[in-house]
Amino acid sequence: MTTPRGGLSPWVHSPVARALLALLLMMALGAVFSADGAFFRWSVHRDMLRQVSVYGMLACGMTVVIISAGIDLSVSSLLALAAVSFAWLTLPGAWPAFYAILVVLAAGAALGSLSGLLVARMRMQPFIVTLAMMVFARGLAKVVSGGRKITNYVTAPDGSSVVVDLPRVFHVIDSRVLGGNLSIVTIVFLVCVALTWVVLERLRLGRHIYAVGGNEEAARLSGVPVRRTLILAYALSGLFAAVAGICQAAQETQGDPETGMAYELDAIAMVVIGGTPLTGGKGSVTLTLIGVLTIGYLQKILSLNAAPEATRLMLTGAIIVCAVLFQRGK
Amino acid sequence: MTTPRGGLSPWVHSPVARALLALLLMMALGAVFSADGAFFRWSVHRDMLRQVSVYGMLACGMTVVIISAGIDLSVSSLLALAAVSFAWLTLPGAWPAFYAILVVLAAGAALGSLSGLLVARMRMQPFIVTLAMMVFARGLAKVVSGGRKITNYVTAPDGSSVVVDLPRVFHVIDSRVLGGNLSIVTIVFLVCVALTWVVLERLRLGRHIYAVGGNEEAARLSGVPVRRTLILAYALSGLFAAVAGICQAAQETQGDPETGMAYELDAIAMVVIGGTPLTGGKGSVTLTLIGVLTIGYLQKILSLNAAPEATRLMLTGAIIVCAVLFQRGK
Amino acid sequence: MAPTSPPLLSVRSARKSFGPVEVLHGVDFEVAAGEVHVLAGENGAGKSTLVNILSGVHTEYDGEVLLQGEPRRFSGPADAAHSGIATIHQELSLVPAMTVADNLFLGGEHTDRWRQVDFTRQEREARRLLEKAGLDLSPRSLVAELPVSLQQMLEIVRALAREAVVLILDEPTSALDERGAEALFRRLATLRQEGVGIVYITHRMDEIYRLADRITVLRDGHHVGTSPAGQLPPTELVSRMVGRDLAAIDRVPPTPDDEVVVRVRDLHIRHRGLPTHELVGGVSFSLRQGEILGLAGLQGSGASHVLRALFGAADGRVSGSMELSGRPHFPASPGEAIREGVILLSSHRKAQGLAPDQSVTHSVSLASLSRYVASLGWIKRGVERRAVQDVTTRLRLAAASLEAPVRTLSGGNQQKAYLARCLLTQPRVLLLDEPTRGIDIGAKTDIYTLMRAWAAEGISILLITSELDELLLLSHRILVLHRGRIVAELDGNSATKDGIMGAAMGHAEAPGGAAP
Amino acid sequence: TTDTPPGHAGTPGDPFVIGMSQSNLGEPWRVQMDADIRAAAETRPNLRVIFKDAQNNSLTQRAQVEEFVEQGVDLMIISPKEAAPLTGPVAAAYRRGIPVIVLDREVQGDEYTCFIGADNVRIGREAGRWIREALGGEGRIVELKGLMTSTPGRDRNQGFLEGLELDDHPDLEVIFSGEMEWLEPNARREMESALATNDVIDAVYAHNDPGAHGAWLAARATGREEEMLFVGIDALPHEGQQYVAQGILDATFLYPTGGAEAIDMALRILTGEEVPKRITLGTRIYTRENIARGGEAIE
Ligand SMILES: Nc1ncnc2c1ncn2[C@@H]1O[C@H](COP(=O)(O)OP(=O)(O)OP(=O)(O)O)[C@@H](O)[C@H]1O
Ligand SMILES: Nc1ncnc2c1ncn2[C@@H]1O[C@H](COP(=O)(O)OP(=O)(O)OP(=O)(O)O)[C@@H](O)[C@H]1O
Ligand SMILES: [Mg+2]
Ligand SMILES: [Mg+2]
């Protein structure tokens, strides 16, 4: 119903070019409202990148699902579930990081593919399936955490409470490299982008995802294993949500069952602002990367200038519309 | 991609019958877990109806928009904006209720049609347009309210604070009739349902909404004024959101800019559980009415039995999936 | 018989661009009362675009539209319709989820002064219109449940329902079978008598010469010429359209060798919803290597269902036996069928064939990706691109670039891309359902020669087409289906149109055939 | 349906039934409140408490009050989301003869049995005073605010500014104040901005401990955490008190849940004793010096 025109049009009208322009405009905005020059320090951009990384990881999975003509509202809760489980395994559980990460990622992928299964096998609508999964996983996170944050202040078997020191993995994930100029989480995010890119642009799975999103019946008649493709798409989204959850836990140095509320909306906004339509069969993770940065800068600029809540909300709404309009070349 | 089969099938498979069955199952559940018989008192059902009414009003508008193959995430914020504006006009403003209501409804319809305009004229995706509107309107609500709740504890021109007594309209809307057995808000909700029914089933506008949702291009070629139809659909949704906002304010006896957070998801869930697919062109407000009751009873039963939060969330998720599966006759 | 009366509707030097590309370069066109004016031209020549200007679909264009001498600029389809211009567009413009009656009056509902729809009146009038058109179907039935042909008939009924001064039909028969077409032609004849001006677009030569008073040819958006049908011999017309002379194809095809590739015995397909209703009721036949076996039949004959069953995409419960070179063949999915060397080209290119936004390369290689992947499903893009290059050049597929989205291709080239996808799977059995639906004479000839070539290479082809000339031209043998059963087997060389039609009609029955 | 609640004997066999409606369980502080109530109730064999969570929705909470009346509880404890919307329902229950204890946030009027709560303005003032004194009357302060649409948010801000006595201390200034909506990740984002725009920061005051913790993480990431004081509010045993014990926060101020007090009052009411209409809870300060001793009460 609302796929953009273009295609015939020259490259300046190409989605990537448009998205980049929107991003540049946003940065220009930052240069103008630079909070007396703060915007020109690299540290600000570094912090923006750190801040946006967790959202970005969600956006990667979201891109895959949206290209398959679906949507995944459950990522925010899966993130919380992953954060809580990771904290629970490593802090009271005292598991070695490696296994903890392995288990958490597996769990994320599993819940994701459960959504995928319902979408692919039961032909349920992605929106409602993942909405249900969102509610369910949030509940699960509270069960795992017993309803409170899981910190390094743990209750020993004998009932007494002791402070265990934070496992190294927490510090590692929350640290920075290149002389403190790049956060590890940002690198994790970029790895997720690269992975997504490979899947979508280089692997057969990617072709199948585009095909299913573009015209499911046609894909089926071309021998595409539609169900498997959809399940894998949602599994991927769940996996990235788990990665994001681990990073969130590491940055908060705790597992908070309430964390990540409504992140799914930011993730979707990032994908769409990049220029990937919700109608499926189109778009790319490159666009999403640009979208992530655009929204990241928007938030950073508002925060740098300590814009009050109300202003912040109204500007965000207005700018999302403008960016997308701009995207569509209107 | 996920429109239900049916149509050829006999009436027991008709959507309404299926939805009703789901509702009956839910009530059976209530009869089993009746919290020492509380479920069998009418007052419990009366309160459930009161509690669900505001959501129901949103669901009415949502039904119209969804049938037009769109979605409206902004209803929750429009509700808050309406609640705040209504409280502001009647309490500090001391306007007569009639004009206050008129202005608020107009504002709701106006903001709704603004979304509609962006969808219809700019060919933007409903999800992203209304997401932006959701953020924007929330900000606007905070501006109107000056970032605080608007109660009958108002600041007089001379700066001193005085308690004015609540205008009658607040009490009227929040009162009950038929010997205290039916809340006014429930009646307002039912009026909204009736209105929606007339629009969708009786008026030409309704035919056009179904047509646009079913096949926009075909509708256009058949001479349906697609843009006007879409704009009206979203305007209707905004209008109902404003009605809901007024009822919310009356019941809360205040205008709270934070009110109604995430109500849009409940409204959508109610529509979909009823059996109206998000793909557009199908469904009815009758189904939505059933969906509203189904979710209303679910919440009531969980609350009556004081289900702990985690359990409540997990059950809700699971039951939504079951209900929809059931709906689809799988 | 060039009409002397002034034109009802005319357009002067019409120009139209989509984005940067101009697709109509100043075209003049007119239609007079009581004449049938045929618009001919290759795919992408600009016929539909011109028609869309006349019917108010495109509101931004250069040039002048005159209706009965009055300069007009329609604000939209509704405006044109109310001015007496009825249009049947190339793509079906019905709303599947709504009833027949709702669709008939969509945009022109009968309402009272409260804007309430007068359903009883609409249903009454719908009945009248349907009877007038000789269609026996309930105004309440859902359009989605009607076969394509009936939907097309419905479009026509709707167009005629509004008292029209000018009637525009853009390839109305592409989804009709012979009988449906006949009914339409009779109707057009009477309208012509009544003085309605008719604009008619088709790619079928026989139709052109049967209907046309005048013929206007477009090529690449240019007006090549307008002349009375009588003064424009077919060869001349074709070279005007295509810009080159087409090699005539002889009828006698090379004979296939006799190794049987597909054997079907007593095939039944029962509708899943209502098992008593048989979509196919006991079909048996065999297909030899290098043979082109034509399946003739009216809408709902079940021909497509047979093909879909062989392809593992049956529309109902399948029973009976199917064999592929001696071994049982019951593909659980299209994927499995493709792996066994069987592939289907569906008759519904838009719904079941191509995804508009995918690049030509990706669309063509989709069904045969497994040939171009290394471990982990990594795609060897070099190999893929070369394979696509190769097949598309062999099919003379014309595209701006192989990276362009298929939506930017003209109808004929989209069809070629779809065919290319099937070929790339290197099939032993090609199931072709309306392979030339809606594509121009040039492209058709290309495809005919190609099909011959494939047959010669030993590929076996099952061909469904509602164009009998095509069927007769290409088939070694012809099976005629009627209501899910084979009623005749004819030899490709000796068969005649009348023979086929006679068999296909079976006993007298309502037009539209066995619609479920 | 105006049947009065059945009532219970208050014996282990037939214990008093208390309904507890919590405005939400998203905030750890409220989880703690329920925990305190549960703990206190477990020591009383003749009490049974039904816990309900209103999911941050006044209307849901109102429905829960109505349900408790329906189910005929002997006494009701409510920690309201909002004053105004729950005044009516609470009054209704009260009139139906059900004693109501209002926790933390007040309802309007006086149709309830007893209010137990702390004073956010006062706690904010204490925090302000402590920071002013710790900085010796001069310094540059960052304030990370909770939701300013909520009463606690505004009170903690107002009290804080009063406590700083900015008028008498020209060299004391709040150089950056961002809204973090009580959320740790947002607090970290806001603090990063504060750090980027200010080369000198002497103290950070966050409206809750998670906020202060988020700010500390941001500062540590730039290696500036030693340069400034971090002060939070709430002092939950598992949260703020731990942060202080671990040397993350320099001070945190107890915002008491009143859970235990509520159960005391409940029992006294049910056994027919007279109870005060209003109980204002004091606060405690926890610093690195006194954390081992369990903090100090502020009179
Ligand atoms: N909406 C559109 N956007 C971009 N290009 C278009 C659009 N519609 C048509 N075109 C291009 O305009 C040219 C003329 O298209 P048109 O549909 O008029 O051809 P046609 O003569 O009807 O072909 P066919 O016989 O296949 O229907 C083609 O090159 C086509 O690709
Ligand atoms: N029950 C069904 N389920 C799915 N598809 C169906 C069903 N019935 C008919 N169709 C589709 O409708 C079309 C009608 O097929 P059928 O074989 O009955 O007549 P046909 O003349 O071959 O149709 P066409 O000429 O449109 O291909 C086929 O393309 C088939 O895929
Ligand atoms: Mg055309
Ligand atoms: Mg067919």
Image (cartoon, coloured by chain):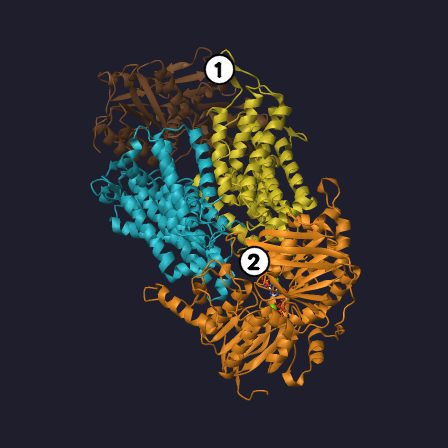
Chain colours: A yellow, B cyan, C orange, D brown
Of circles 1 and 2, the one toward us is: 2
Residue D82 visible? The answer is no
Tell which subunit mark 1 falls on.
Answer: D
Three-letter amino acid code of the residue under disc 1? Arg
Residue placed most toward the observer, B43 or C181: C181
Three-letter amino acid code of the residue under disc 2? Leu
Tell me where residue A249 sits by quadrant.
top right
Mark 1 nearby-residue class (10 Å; few <14, some 14–19, many ≥20)? some
Residue placed most toward the observer, C437 or A257: C437
Tell which subunit mark 2 falls on.
Answer: C
Q: In which quadrant of the rendered image does the N terminus of chain C lie?
A: bottom right
User: Residue C439: where, in percent of width, then height?
Assistant: 65, 67
Horizontal side of A259 relative to C214 (left or right) equals left
User: Residue D193: where, in percent of width, then height?
Assistant: 53, 34
Residue B323 visible? The answer is yes
Residue placed most toward the observer, D193 or A94: A94
Q: Going 44% across and 37% down the picture, which residue do you hit?
A: B319
Labels 1, 2: one chain: no
Q: What element carries label 2?
A: strand
Residue C501 vs C358, above or below: the answer is: below
User: Residue D241: where, in percent of width, then height?
Assistant: 46, 18
Q: Ligand 2 closer than 8 Å to the CB at disc 2? A: yes
Q: Going 51% across and 28% down the picture, which residue do you hit?
A: D215
Residue B89 vs C165, above or below: the answer is: above
Q: What element carries label 1?
A: loop
Q: Ligand 1 closer than 8 Å to the CB at disc 1? A: no
User: Residue A142: where, in percent of width, then height?
Assistant: 47, 28
Q: Which numbered circle lies on residue C267?
A: none
Q: Going 47% across and 45% down the picture, which residue do you hit?
A: B329
For the residues bearing labels 1 and 2, Cβ distance under 8 angstroms: no
Residue picked out by circle 1: D288
Q: Which numbered circle lies on residue C279?
A: 2
